[in-house]
Image: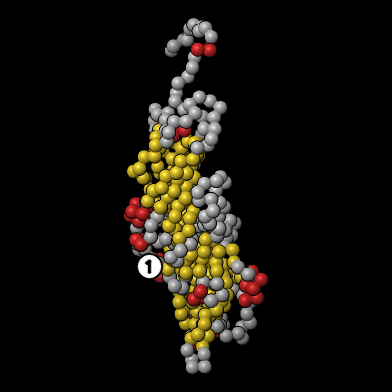
Amino acid sequence: MKVQLNVLIGVLLFFSIISCDRRPLEDLPDSYQYAEIQLKVDWSKLEDQPPAEATALIYKYEENTEGKLVGNSIFRTVIISESNDCIIRLPEGVYSFIVYNDKPDEAATYTLHDYQTFENAKISLNRADKPSYDHPDAQTEFASSPELLAIDLKEKYHVTVDMVRVTKDLRKTKNPKPVDVLWFQPLQITRNVTVEIKVDGLQNLLYTDAISIGGYRDVHLAKQQTSTVAKSKLFQLSDKNFYPNDLYNGIITGTFTTFGAGDIKGNNAVVKSMKTDDASKVKLTLFFVLKDKERTLIIHQLDVTDPFNQEGRKKHHIHLKLDQVIKLPDVEIEGGSDSGFNPDVDDWGDGEEVDVPVK
């Protein structure tokens, strides 16, 4: 997942991005005082395919004149490759980490903001395109549907003088090794939601747009919570399936993704402390465009809060099979007869008898 970082030039002045694959991150001289730490990422809690890479943001605390830790600014960014582990070199000090999945080849759907300090880092959904046709919500600002996002944090990790000394001694041996291992187990903070709706009169339907209201816009990482601001998401229910032996009625389905962790259990600080969805309302506005010349627009609004929360407590892939049945009126289809199956055979001419062999 490719994350768009604001003020790219400024970032390059603050830190450099370094890749690693079981090797030290930089070619520091042996006289430099540092400890070698191994970072390991465990993707076993993900319901989806583990990503190829991970990004680790490393922050370093400073001490004031009274010896108290103050500030926590970006120290280094590390790209952890497919091996899911690497060795980093850190001077004596106190550090915090943000680790999240990274897929550089995919289009970005969210942006990392204010990441120069650990306390302010947050992820916000980017803006999405507005509907291509005129309807009552056309002026609403829409948020993108986030790609898979999994995060883990580690705060105030101490690199001691002894760790630096041991690293120096180990580097003199034939088999140097890291003095400590930091494990990260990112958990998903995104949900994939499939909506399934029964429709009577499905043969009259040209297409269906839907707007989901109630998903979170921001995730504050150090605060370990989502924002209270909800944003609308536009998606299509483009999969139409008629019931067996039925030319008129069937089911439509569509999918969108959103931030939110529900009550899914885990040992990840972000997910454990993130707000549950109990206080939020999740609503769907459905826009049915019919096949008639006027492109008649029919709007239905549904509250799916209860099924959304019930399913969301169990898993990150939610399938909402709604009990409501949407009934669409019969219309005269543009360029043809009305939608009822009433063919006119008066102008077909005289019939002709044909022998059909039967085996």
Quadrant of the image occupied by residue 227? bottom left
Question: Can residue 38 be seen here?
Answer: no
Residue 343, image x and y in percent?
47, 19
Whether residue 236 sits left or right of residue 312 in the image: it is right
Q: How is the image coloured?
A: secondary structure
Task: Please give the name of the residue rendered at 41% of the width and 47% of the height, measured from the top-left corner.
Answer: 301
Pick the quarter of the image with the N terminus: bottom right
Whether residue 65 sits left or right of residue 305 in the image: it is right
**Amino acid bearing label 1:** Lys
In this view, 30 is above or below 84: below
Task: Please give the name of the residue rendered at 57% of the width and 72% of the height, measured from the top-left corner.
Answer: 77
In this view, 89 is above or below 82: below
Front one among 232 and 32 = 232
In this view, 344 is above or below 276: above
Front one among 94 and 8 = 8
Residue 140, image x and y in percent?
52, 55
Front one among 148 and 259 = 259
Quadrant of the image occupied by residue 102? bottom right
- Which structural element holds mark 1? helix
Label 1 environment density (alpha carbons within 10 Å; few <14, some 14–19, many ≥20): some
Pick the quarter of the image with the C terminus: top left
Residue 9, image x and y in percent?
66, 71
Task: Please give the name of the residue rendered at 55% of the width and 79% of the height, measured from the top-left corner.
Answer: 73
**Residue underneath mark 1:** 272
Task: Please give the name of the residue rendered at 50% of the width and 37% of the height, measured from the top-left corner.
Answer: 296
